[in-house]
Amino acid sequence: MMRQNARECVGTHFEGQHLSLSDLKENPNIQNDYLYKNNIPAYPESVEFHVQKVSHVTGKQGLEGIFLNSGFKQPPEMVASDQPHFLWWALSVTSDDISSAEDRFLTSLFPHRSAAQLCNQSPVLEHFTSSKAFQKKSSYGNFCFTFSLKELLWHYRKQFCDEQGLVLHVYETVLYPKEIQYTVVVHPGYVHKYDNYPRLPDYGDGVCGYNGGAMWWRCQSPSEAYKNKLEVNDRSVSVSPHHREEYYVWDHVCVAFHMEPGWVLRVDQDRLFKRLNVCEMCKPYLLRPHDSQLSLHEAESVLTDLKARMGWGLKRGGWR
């Protein structure tokens, strides 16, 4: 089903499913020029990442609101719309996550690698993990809150869930012109509007799941522009330049927390500041109304001013 999201981006939605790249290609009803390109150079496919952290990025207006409310809530314009009532977080992939994923990838190719092979193998994934799923820049603002998913689930469970606990479901796949978004919905067990959606698996052969405090994700396409090609021989893997850059779809995972109007996912001020960093913005700019892109220097100044106004860092009359 084609529909527009809150940021006015039009995509094709497949509810209750996480469709792999090959699943999408086999759907005869999809019209997408990038999806069906057949000149994409070989790249590491379905590499499994285990990601423990998630991030929520916002602009200056959202930043002020988060500290005013002592936590996260839906913006008023979204509460008033007919969009689902979600608080959105993205997987925050670290360099350690990429290193671990590379080790799993190489082990899957060469289960009995020798010590010499391990020493002689040059890095592979760093040549391909260039999509927005792996970047520190964001389209949504200059202020990035990063939490462990386990911690965030704990806060949500404690504040909104009764003895039934919380539940994670496969919510949907959204195909945009150059992007595949896999959404996981988190909700209290007493909220039954998602009962017809499949439970998110602990493990299996799907696109993603949650196990042991981490989201595992089999990345379908780690780059939106392929400049290199993967070459696999009997004993090693190498990367060589492709003769030209090829644009393609890329994929990522979002975690959407169900929020009722008026709900605030509260986090104390000290923890909010410790989980907050500034970041650069990248195109497309998808800021909320009345927000604007800031330079890194401007964003740092805004954060410094906010800390001063909130008195954060003051201890015994001085800055700690």
Image: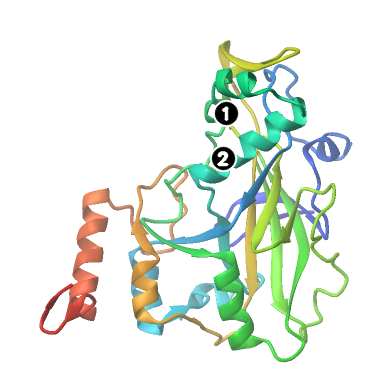
Residue at 77% of width from left, 29% of height from top?
Answer: 111
Quarter of the picture containing the N terminus is bottom right
Looking at the rendered structure, the secondary structure element under dot 2 is helix
Q: CA distance from mark 1 to mark 2?
A: 11 Å
> Which residue is drawn at the image coordinates 58% and 58% (left, top)?
52
Q: Secondary structure at mark 1?
A: loop
Residue 5 lies in quadrant? bottom right
On residue 128, the disc is 1
Of residue 125 and residue 77, the one placed in the foreground of this image is 125
Q: Is residue 233 above or below residue 45?
A: above
The x, y position of residue 159, in whole percent, is 58, 87
Circle nearer the N terminus (1, 2): 2
Residue type beneath disc 1: Phe
Residue 260 can be seen in this image? no
Q: Which residue is mark 2?
A: 98
Which numbered disc covers residue 205? none
Q: Position of residue 48 (x, y in %)?
A: 70, 42
Quarter containing the C terminus: bottom left
Q: Position of residue 109 (x, y in %)?
A: 76, 26
Q: Indicate the position of residue 307 as horizontal and vertical percent values.
A: 23, 72
